[in-house]
Image (tube, rainbow, N blue to C red):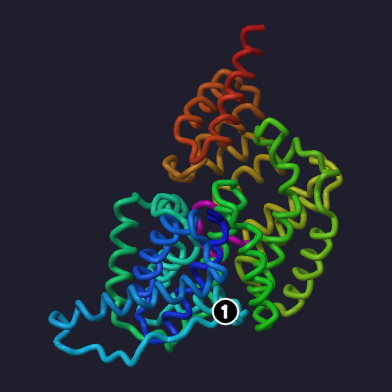
């Protein structure tokens, strides 16, 4: 059973059902039922045309559900017959489905959450972590979004900004290593950049390329997380860096700065430094100032505090960090790092261990635990 094939085909099949008249929620449910049948039957009897098989079975599931729903909706579903699958259809529906999920009837936050869950393949917990809200809160938000669009015909696609937010979060999950989604997010953003000259589309594409260029150096052979300052920069993909910088410069030339362009500018400054010591932290702080002005994001403020610590010294970074909510994700890890830079190893070791207990993933937890152990060993010596 090729699970990656099923994951790839899912948004395409949902898109086909939506275009044939199914509401999004009903199409999603029908495809999920078809996938269950595929998991049960394909290992023994794989179809020659997996996509056509899924379209046919999912459409049957949708029609069956529609027929059983007649009493509640007080109407009859008229069906002339099942449409034949279209094996030769090669149109990529994924990007279109992203736009359809960003429906005007939904708030941007709900549209993003629904798309991440239904199309992006993220779990409710992952989405909640990205939005800094409890998992139960996010589950309710997604449920409300599904109810809102359950009877909606998707003929009013949403706006670019909402789709960009989804692509950004999907890329971040893929880049963290939890799911292999980074390359897919880049592919879709490239498609979107071809279709529109929107400067923030270009900014997001540049940001993705610059971060993805560093991916080979982010983990050691044993799976250990390698911080940016310790990465082997010879492993960075210079072709992707050059492309990302070119895309960013073209976007900035339009003089309509947005948050993704600002983030890409920060990534470009990191990529431009031949060594960690040569990083232009003063410029990075200036770009974080722009990012905070544009978004007010607490995460941007947190990253800015760390950058201030690099540019103006750890005491200045600690002062900036003290102005922020201590419950922010990675706040404790940043506090530990700045205390270490300031020479307070005992406090740093304690904070690294504390940060490890609330780390969002295993590689990060392992890294923070190692940092605590390293400092404790130095204190014993």
Q: Determine whether 168 is above or below 149 in the image.
A: above
Q: Position of residue 305 (x, y in %)?
A: 59, 45
Viewer-proximal residue among 237 and 377 = 237
Q: Determine whether 317 is above or below 50 in the image.
A: above
Q: Determine whether 26 is above or below 73 in the image.
A: above
Asked whether residue 144 is drawn in magenta, I would say: no
* Extreme residue toward the top, this view: 381
Q: Going 62% across and 11% down the picture, which residue do you hit?
A: 379
Q: Determine whether 342 is above or below 142 in the image.
A: above
Q: Position of residue 210 (x, y in %)?
A: 73, 57
Residue 339 is drawn in which quadrant? Answer: top right
Q: Which residues are magenta?
A: 290-299
Residue 221 is drawn in which quadrant? Answer: top right
Residue 286 is drawn in which quadrant? Answer: bottom right
Residue 292 appears in the figure: no
Q: Going 63% across and 73% down the picture, which residue do you hit?
A: 200
Viewer-proximal residue among 4 and 215 = 4
Residue holding disc 1: 87
Viewer-proximal residue among 176 and 331 = 176
Q: Is residue 374 left or right of residue 241?
A: left
Q: Going 53% across and 32% down the picture, which residue do you hit?
A: 365
Q: Position of residue 82 (x, y in %)?
A: 38, 85
Q: Position of residue 37 (x, y in %)?
A: 39, 61
Viewer-proximal residue among 87 and 4 = 87
Image quarter in which the C terminus is found: top right
Q: Main secondary structure of the magenta part?
A: helix
Q: Is residue 175 left or right of residue 279?
A: left
Residue 57 appears in the figure: yes
């Amino acid at each position: 059973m090729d699970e990656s094939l099923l994951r790839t085909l899912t948004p395409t099949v949902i898109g086909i059902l939506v275009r044939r008249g199914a509401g999004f929620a009903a199409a999603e449910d029908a495809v999920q039922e078809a996938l269950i049948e595929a998991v049960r039957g394909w290992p023994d009897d794989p179809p020659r045309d997996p996509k056509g098989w899924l379209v046919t079975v999912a459409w049957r599931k949708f029609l069956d559900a529609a027929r059983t729903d007649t009493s509640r909706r007080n109407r009859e579903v008229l069906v002339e017959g099942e449409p034949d699958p279209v094996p030769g259809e090669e149109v990529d529906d994924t990007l279109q489905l992203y736009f359809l999920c960003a429906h005007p009837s939904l708030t941007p936050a709900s549209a993003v959450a629904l798309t991440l869950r239904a199309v992006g393949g993220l779990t409710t917990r992952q989405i909640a972590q990205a939005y800094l809200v409890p998992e139960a809160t996010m589950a309710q938000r997604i449920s409300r979004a599904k109810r809102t669009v359950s009877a909606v015909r998707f003929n009013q696609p949403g706006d670019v900004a909402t789709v960009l937010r989804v692509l950004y979060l999907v890329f971040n999950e893929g880049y963290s290593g939890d799911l292999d989604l980074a390359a897919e997010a880049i592919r879709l953003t490239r498609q979107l950049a071809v279709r529109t000259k929107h400067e923030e589309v270009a900014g997001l594409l540049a940001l993705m390329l610059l971060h993805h260029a560093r991916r080979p150096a982010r983990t050691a052979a044993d799976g250990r997380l390698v911080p940016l300052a310790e990465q082997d920069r010879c492993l960075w993909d210079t072709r992707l860096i050059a492309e990302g910088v070119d895309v960013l410069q073209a976007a900035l030339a339009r003089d309509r700065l947005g948050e993704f362009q600002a983030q890409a500018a920060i990534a470009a400054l990191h990529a431009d430094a031949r060594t960690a010591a040569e990083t232009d932290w003063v410029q990075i702080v200036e770009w974080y100032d722009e990012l905070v002005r544009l978004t007010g994001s607490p995460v941007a403020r947190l990253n800015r505090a760390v950058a201030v610590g690099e540019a103006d010294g750890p005491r200045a970074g600690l002062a900036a960090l003290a102005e922020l909510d201590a419950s922010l994700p990675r706040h404790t890890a940043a506090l530990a790092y700045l205390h270490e830079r300031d020479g307070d190893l005992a406090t740093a070791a304690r904070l690294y261990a504390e940060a490890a207990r609330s780390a969002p993933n295993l590689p990060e937890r392992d890294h923070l635990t190692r940092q605590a152990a390293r400092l404790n060993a130095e204190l014993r010596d």
